[in-house]
């Protein structure tokens, strides 16, 4: 049959009803969003204050570009990570829990990818200003590799080892 298991298959595997699976999945999704959104909000708040600091005007073109990339990645990540909450409110009591879980998962995955871009570019920006471009690229690369490895490669490897 292939594809991802739906709530019916998951329910049989865990001796739950499909509704219980969807309720549990929704709870897990919302808890993951709670954890993630705090970091995004802190980063976004910090980025919004930077242009009003005295040294912001001294940034070179590279640092300004990094700032814009960081700001936009953080803003988009925040929008995507908050979207499942709005989605839930719109579909609440309309028996659309399966769509909420499916679409919320997609929004969370893309939002996390943008968050990783935001974190890497924030590290690049700060290290560029403090230590120079070489150190910034090295530090950003380390954060990027660790993020990609822990957020994406390890989970994929775990899925591959289940076979």
Image (cartoon, rainbow, N blue to C red):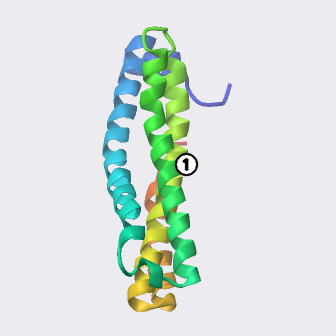
Spot occupied by residue 115 in the image (x, y as percentages of width and height)? 47, 56
Would you place residue 62 above or below residue 77 in this image? Answer: below
Whole-percent x, y for residue 71 in the image: 49, 61
Q: Please tell me which residue is depicted at 42% across the width and 74% down the height of the picture.
A: 123
Q: Evaluate whether residue 133 shows in this view.
A: yes
Q: Quadrant of the C terminus?
A: top right
Work out whether residue 68 or residue 94 is closer to the camera in this orientation and state it. Answer: 68
Q: Is residue 161 visible?
A: no
38 to 100, vertically: above or below: below
In the picture of the structure, the residue carrying the numbered disc 1 is: 160
**The quarter of the displayed image where residue 119 is located:** bottom left
Residue 88 screen position, x and y as percent: 44, 22
**Quarter-of-image position of residue 127:** bottom left
Residue sitting at 44 percent across and 80 percent down?
139
Is 72 positioned to the left or the right of 12 in the image?
Answer: right
Relative to 18, does residue 122 appear above or below in the rendering? below
Q: Residue at x 31, y 48 (%)?
A: 38
Residue at the location (36% across, 47% down)? 36
Front residue of 6/142: it is: 142
Q: 118 or 16: nearer the eye?
A: 118
Q: Which of the pair 13/29 is nearer the observer?
A: 29
């Amino acid at each position: 049959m292939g594809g991802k298991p739906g709530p019916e298959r998951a329910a049989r595997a865990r001796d739950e009803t499909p509704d219980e699976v969807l309720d549990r999945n929704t709870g897990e999704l919302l808890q993951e969003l709670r954890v993630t959104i705090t970091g995004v909000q802190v980063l976004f708040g910090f980025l919004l204050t930077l242009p009003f600091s005295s040294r912001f005007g001294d940034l070179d073109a590279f640092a300004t570009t990094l700032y814009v990339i960081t700001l936009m990645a953080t803003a988009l990540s925040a929008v995507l990570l908050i979207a499942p909450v709005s989605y839930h409110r719109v579909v609440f009591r309309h028996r659309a829990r399966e769509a909420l879980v499916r679409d919320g998962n997609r929004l969370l995955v893309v939002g996390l990818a943008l968050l990783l871009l935001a974190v890497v570019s924030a590290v690049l920006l700060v290290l560029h200003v403090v230590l120079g471009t070489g150190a910034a690229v090295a530090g950003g690369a380390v954060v990027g590799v660790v993020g990609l490895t822990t957020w994406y490669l390890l989970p994929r490897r775990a899925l591959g080892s289940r076979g």
